[in-house]
Image (cartoon, rainbow, N blue to C red):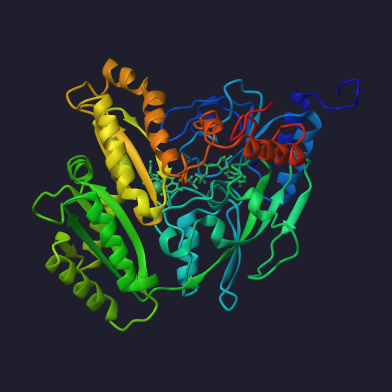
Amino acid sequence: VNDAGRLSIDETVERIKALVGPKGWVSDPNDIEPYLVEPRGLFHGATRLVVRPASTADVAAIVTLCAAAKLPIVPQGGNTGLVGAQVPPENGNNIVVSLQRMNKIRAVDPLNYTMTVEAGVILADIQKAAEEADRLFPLSLGAEGSCRIGGNLSTNAGGVGVLRYGNTRDLALGLEVVLPDGRIWDGLRALRKDNTGYDLKQLFIGGEGTLGIITAAVLKLFPRPREIETAMIALANVDDVMEIFARARAASGDQLTAFELIPRFGIEMTTQHLHGISDPIAAAYPWYVLLEISSSEASGASRAKLENFLAAQIEAGLVVDGVIAASAAQAANIWRIRDGMTEAQGYEGGSIKHDVSVPVSRVAEFIRTAMAAVEARLPGIRPCPFGHVGDGNIHFNLSQPKGADPKGVDKAAYLARWGEFNDIVHGIVAALGGSISAEHGIGRLKRDEITHYKSPLELDLMRKIKHALDPDGIMNPGKVIAAE
Ligand code: FAD
Ligand code: MLT
Ligand code: ZN
């Protein structure tokens, strides 16, 4: 205890261990390691302790102790984030608070179409629980088997259903949050209408753990689809992709639930590098789209609608080839291609990543312009634009030129040009009125980059909000916005 009567950092850490008991903390270096790294291998942090509380009261007690000692906290869910936001800083002067043990579904209310969950529930388990109640929780992404809802909320995750159902922000009605001073905000309202002042929950959604720790949430549910039809279609050029999007939407309205772009390169790398995936279309074409329509009525009409639509577009010469999945296994194969893109690209050497959005009306222009610009800068570079183009989000990932040693110095030399290619791509995005982080967030990766693309006024307001909620800067410091 120091002169001011405050616990030292070491004493604080010991108090936290005693509070949560032996099951509630990890400090052995081997056991801690998985909490210090992230999927892209770009950041490797250090920490004094990983603490795994089992209740909101425990989280509040931990944060209260940390606030008194000014000990930084890094909240962590499933550790699948792609911008380094969940990784502790390298100096090790922090604790990681993992929500993994807070994995209970507190309540399902089918009449109210809501579910109340703790922050550590795995997304796939939430989807399953909704289905068991004959409802749909529509958030869906490649990492759904390991990401946790607190992480989804804190990153405002997007995924493949945004076109129809919106981002995570649109799927939450209420939150419970432990604030940086240890107080618990009970905002677990299950209301679709609530105009009682500022919508505080929206600060924490997409806040990347910098304003507080989400401990529970009330989620919105939807009617469960009775029919889902999945197609893979081939197109000759990227302008046709977006023309088909417009026509598919006009033909099926809100029944269009996914529209995901895959370039030829994506088909080649997933079928070559991943097990059990086959190319559903025999011939090779430059562009493909995974298109899904679904309906909560089981009338067989969706299948007929999709068949008629594709026949008309083939007749019109826009769709050059295509297949409608005839079984659940065929649909799963098409989805495995889409979801395997990132993993497969890992086998192609270095990949410089961009997660950008532009207005849907400018997606084709963005892809054409950005591909030409990066190819002019580095002949042989292999652009892989893919993803959620139906909502304007393109994962514009760039594989290193072929022939270069994927593991050797060429990879390092290529990745050293990350900033140079970011400048090119983000410049085009900005000129088209887009965003340099569509769905993955800012974290560490884009914290400094974002200062070139947000106005001084926006940055000033963000700093003021951070300061108002977390004046001592203990909640996930160094992420999203740099300390002044
Ligand atoms: P973590 O990685 O643990 O944390 C992410 C951020 O949230 C950090 O800032 C962390 O501090 C904070 N945080 C976590 N839990 C809490 C909490 N309870 N309270 C406060 N802060 C918290 N993302 C998309 O948006 N769309 C995709 O399509 C998509 N596809 C992916 C595919 C793959 C294969 C992978 C590996 C990742 C993908 N991601 C995607 C990124 C990632 O899965 C999402 O960002 C996800 O929402 C992160 O959840 P998580 O539980 O892993 O969070
Ligand atoms: C995806 O949609 O597959 C991910 O968000 C992209 C990625 O992993 O980079
Ligand atoms: Zn994505």
Question: Is 286 rendered above or below residue 69?
Answer: below
Question: Is 260 rendered above or below residue 269?
Answer: below
Question: Is 423 rendered above or below residue 110?
Answer: above
Q: State the residue in front, 445 or 46.
A: 445
Q: Ligand 2 is located in which of the four quadrants?
A: top left
- Within the image, what quadrant is residue 246 found in? bottom left
Q: Quadrant of the N terminus?
A: top right
Question: Is 481 rendered above or below residue 122?
Answer: above
Residue at the image point whose x is 64% and y is 53% from the top: 202
Residue 183 picture location, percent across and down: 79, 47
Residue 371 picture location, percent across and down: 27, 37
Q: Left or right of 179: which side holds 231?
A: left
Residue 22 visible to the viewer: no
- Within the image, what quadrant is residue 477 found in? top right
Residue at the image point whose x is 33% and y is 67% from the top: 249
Residue 114 picture location, percent across and down: 58, 69
Q: Quadrant of the C terminus?
A: top right
Q: State the residue in front, 447 or 318.
A: 318
Residue 331 visible to the viewer: yes
Q: State the residue in front, 271 or 428.
A: 428
Q: Residue furthest left?
A: 283
Residue at the image point whose x is 48% and y is 30% from the top: 37
Residue at the image point whose x is 75% and y is 25% from the top: 9
Q: Residue furthest bottom?
A: 299
- Within the image, what quadrant is residue 90 found in? top right
Marks counted in the figure total: 0
Q: Residue furthest top?
A: 409
